[in-house]
Amino acid sequence: MGQAYLWLKAAHLILVIFWIAGLFLLPRFHIYHAEEPVGSPQAAKWIEREGRLRRIILNPSMIGVWILGLALAVQIGAFSMGWFHAKLLLVILLSGYHGWAVGYGRKLAAGHRPPTTKALRLLNEVPGVAVILIVILVIVKPL
């Protein structure tokens, strides 16, 4: 595959950066959104910002990450490598986190408010921990 492999790998990494940036931002947006009164003009602005982040950055980049990541995995025969299984599990969990965050934004838009934003602040750390583990698996390949 030669040069094409390197271009696919570069595109995959670029989309990973966009996706993770969005996963850092969306829960932070939710924290600020949850602090606004239901139905307020400020809450409406957060709903609009969250929607744009999902449509423009989060969903397209996640789809691209999956498509290019699977293409790269097939190309190098990664399905037989232990480190890849661990990475794949983490990416599946991150995708689930993505789904949870999108769903939670819909609940906020419908007027649901958490009793505190402490849990949201803790959940905001999930993408960072996942990125640390994934980078170690891909670069060091400990398994």
Image (tube, grey):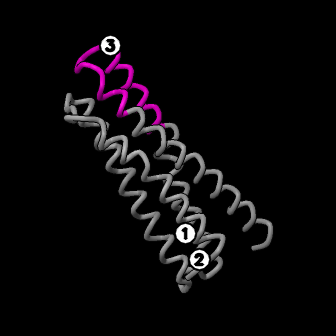
Q: Secondary structure at mark 2?
A: helix
Q: Secondary structure at mark 1?
A: helix
Q: Which mark is residue 41?
A: 3
Left or right, 33 with reference to 10: left
Q: Which mark is residue 74?
A: 2
Q: Please provide percent x and percent y for residue 140.
A: 65, 74
Quadrant that contains the C terminus: bottom right
Q: Amino acid at mark 2?
A: Val
- Residue depicted at x 61% and y 77%: 141
Give the CA separation, mark 3 to mark 1.
42 Å
Q: Amino acid at mark 1?
A: Leu
Q: Residue at label 1?
A: 70
Give the CA separation, mark 3 to mark 2.
48 Å
> Looking at this view, is 107 or 121 the one in front?
121
Q: Amino acid at mark 3?
A: Pro
Q: Residues within 10 Å of mark 2 (few under 14, many from 20)?
A: few
- Residue depicted at x 54% and y 43%: 21
Q: Please provide percent x and percent y for residue 90.
A: 45, 66
Q: Are marks 3 and 2 in contact (CB under 8 Å)?
A: no
> Looking at this view, is 63 or 100 the one in front?
100
Q: Please provide percent x and percent y for residue 17.
A: 60, 49
Quadrant that contains the N terminus: bottom right
Of the image marks 3 and 2, the number of the one nearer the N terminus? 3
User: Residue 49, relative to residue 99: is it above or below?
Assistant: above
Q: Residues within 10 Å of mark 1 (few under 14, many from 20)?
A: some
Of the image marks 3 and 1, the number of the one nearer the N terminus? 3
Specify the segment rendered in magenta. Answer: 30-55
Q: Nearer the viewer, mark 3 or mark 2?
A: 3
Q: Are marks 1 and 2 in contact (CB under 8 Å)?
A: yes
